[in-house]
Amino acid sequence: MRAGQIVEGRFEIERFAGAGAMGLVYRARDTLSGGPVALKILAHGGTERFLREGRVLAELNHPHIVRYVAHGKTEADESYLAMEWLEGEDLGRRLRRGPLELADAVTLTHAVCLALAVAHRRGVVHRDIKPSNLYLVDGEPSKVKVLDFGAARFDRGASHAATASGVVLGTPGYMAPEQVRDERPVDRRADIFALGCVLFEVVTGQPAFSAQHVLALLGKILRDDPPLLRALVPGAPKELEDMLIGMLKKDPAVRVGDAELLADALAEIGTGLGPSVVSAADAPGARVRGCLVYRWWNSATNDHFYTTDPGGEFAPSTGYAYEGAPFHTFPEGTAGTTALFRWYGPAPSEHFYTTDPSGELAPRLGYQPQGVLGYVAVAPVPGAVALHRWWHVDRADHFYTTDATGEIAVHLGYVYEGVTGYVMPAVRSSAGTLDAVIALEA
């Protein structure tokens, strides 16, 4: 194409920008908006994969996913895809200069998790997360954009997910074991594995898996685990190392599989690394928080599961779905707080939480003590919210929520039992947290 040429009466070619895996990329001006766009023209490869990228991007709208503009055919019957024009460099090129700072690595991974969470909720699995598909706008990790959804599949319908027999999509070095084995269907947990490989590389400066040839590399993915993160980067948080272990599990059934959960956990880790993940205004409060509590829900048993483990313990493998991180406990030893003890009943596979160290009726119901979930304030303090407790006598089960209406507890036959204690909401100002601790210490 030449400068000045108009594509489909809308996009005016300005200049050739480069060649991609499947096509040629031009900078063009969108005559409707007046702004620049990246116009990708299919030059070789499968038309279906090229068009799939357009269909996927048209359904996704997130600040960390490259923005779709249009797709169609040129006057020469060539397929094209128009996307927002980006200035900067891809992560692969950036990594040639060395690893990122820890805070930047967490910031970038957090942003990609948010993007993947949106895609996964729409039933889209990317299937080719790798450094060259993560673009750093203006070179900033906080402005990362996920690119190239050409290998994506829709979980919700086989008609969009067809892949030729024997064709394995993905990039060696970032492929999940189930992709290497060509198992079907490959779901969102493959994206988590690939992102774990990326996170390992941006922190350590070396690939999670490497070998001299592709077959040996794929064998390592199936067989070997990468070194522990802190063996290579001693200053990395233990929580980040544990998260990587969960992301890189060989078996997808036990792998951390929820991008939104990972985003919450990364935001928590990031607060200890400086203001790059959370705002500078929020950072001071991070120093006085206790554990972030993650909530899971099983619709079949109408049961909640609370844990401070970002991997969800056994919740994902027992039918629980991630519901977010609603609150923080207080740090151990904070004056004016008491322990929230956790008990576990293996027969109903349920937890029982209480501030009574004797466990109330938990021992008589066959529950075993599992330690302390966290510490809650015994009286209201500025910035804190009440943790309400509801009880279902027939099921011998408690329901805990920071929502004073009880959410669905009433509709499920639970009876209100009062306030268990006071906790800090996960989304809050640093001032509220600091005021709460000052009030407790006073």
Image (tube, helix red, strand yellow):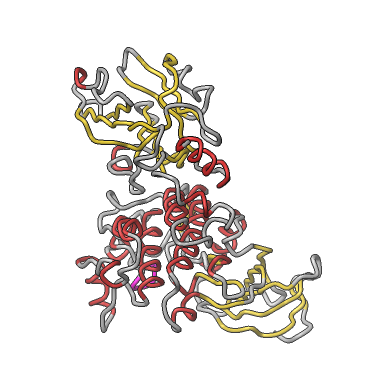
Q: Residue placed at 35% from the left, 43% from the top? A: 308
Location of residue 175 in the rendering, given as x and y in whole percent from the top left corner: 34, 67
Residue 36 relative to residue 125: left or right = right
Residue 56 image-quadrant placement: bottom right
Image-quadrant location for residue 204? bottom left
Q: Is residue 51 left or right of residue 352?
A: right
Quarter of the rendering occupied by the N terminus = bottom right
Q: Residue 34: x, y in percent?
A: 80, 70
Between 230 and 38, which is closer to the camera in this rendering? 230
Please tell me which residue lies in front, 232 or 66: 232
- Residue 430 is situated, as x and y percent measured from the top left of the image, at 55, 47
Rendered position, 432 above or below 413: below
Residue 137 is one of the magenta-drawn residues: no
- Asked whether 372 or 210 is in front, the reply is 372
Identity of the residue furthest to the front in this view: 442
Q: Nearer the viewer, residue 15 or 430?
A: 430
Residue 295 shown left or right of residue 354 in the figure: right
Please name the residue shown 38% across and 64% down the image: 194
What range is drawn magenta here?
168-173
